[in-house]
Amino acid sequence: MDNKKYNFIFIVFIGLFLIFFISGCTVTEENIDEVAAKMQDAYNNINTIQFHQVQTFKIDPKESSQENLEDDLKRGAILSEGYLITKFVTDVYIEKPDKEKIDYSRTEGYMVDQISKLIAGNEMYEEFSDRIYKFTCVEQIRKEPNFLKNLQDILNKHKLELVGTETIFDREAYKIKLETDQFMWIDKETYLPLKEVTNLYEIIYSNYRINEDLSDSIFFPPSNKKLIEQGCPLEKKVSEAPESGEEPPPAKTIPGESPTTLPRKTIVEGEPCDAESFNDGIACYDYCISIGKNAASCGEGICKCI
């Protein structure tokens, strides 16, 4: 009896030991706060980064004029399930704190002829096949979308929810929910995004190279094209009506200056936005998707992210 008793106790002890041992060796799944903290660490540790990016957007044709719609279709965009599908295939180079180069290796749609965009300090260049536009408006340049700024905005401005883990592009990833229909897959090793999806766009990130030396030549504009210099676009300022009810005087312009026609506008949420203007709608939409929203509107006379 004693031997049986001791054998029973020994078996129970071994069983409990195995339970505790296995439990101790099991990796506890990270929660969203831990994932977000490691995403922030990854962001903080980046000095230079380069990667490949494929962006596919859906645009409601009703928001485009018939002329622009036909032009986009001629340039390679397609109509699918009631949307105009536009794709950008790009290579991105960023060096903190203020250098960024985006090379458009292939595009479809309304920016089909743009080759690259470069930001270096307080200057921005947009290169086309036959010309380069140089911008020196610091306020405008600071509003330009940026991969690292977008990543920081996701961490600071969104309520994140960890949905689970998935294997994507042969990489283990956290699936994170940002909004009702917005999801992002974060690489478990690098804590950088692999994919971002809403009902209106998809972005796929690949070929990350982090903290490798970037050639200075990347951030110099080519010198063999026509250079067109642009300053700050003049903004329309609405004066308050006088108490007498009289119409306010027309806005004054500086002699010798005229509104600048930009190859690509920059509008942020809350700024004036013409609902009838295709370019205004696109500029507002570009900004909204850069901060993680999935739609935009100019319906009330201002750019509004939805």
Image: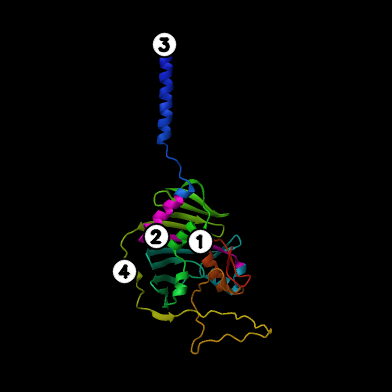
Q: Which residue is situated farthest in the right direction here? A: 245
Q: Label 3 to label 1, Cα distance in Å?
A: 74 Å
Residue annotated with mark 1: 56
Query: Crowding near pointer 2: few (<14 within 10 Å), some, many (20+)?
Result: some
Query: Crowding near pointer 4: few (<14 within 10 Å), some, many (20+)?
Result: few
Q: Where residue 108 appears, x then y in whole percent?
A: 49, 66
Residue kind at label 1, given as amino acid type: Thr
Lower sequence index among marks 1 and 2: 2
Residue at image point 57% right, 63% down: 295
Element class at badge 4: helix
Query: Crowding near pointer 1: few (<14 within 10 Å), some, many (20+)?
Result: some
Residue at image point 62% right, 68% down: 62
Q: Which stretch appears magenta?
A: 35-61
Residue kind at label 3, given as amino acid type: Asp
Residue kind at label 4, given as amino acid type: Asp
Residue annotated with mark 2: 51
Element class at badge 3: helix
Q: Is residue 195 above or below residue 298?
A: above
Q: Is residue 75 above or below residue 22?
A: below
The circle on residue 44 is none
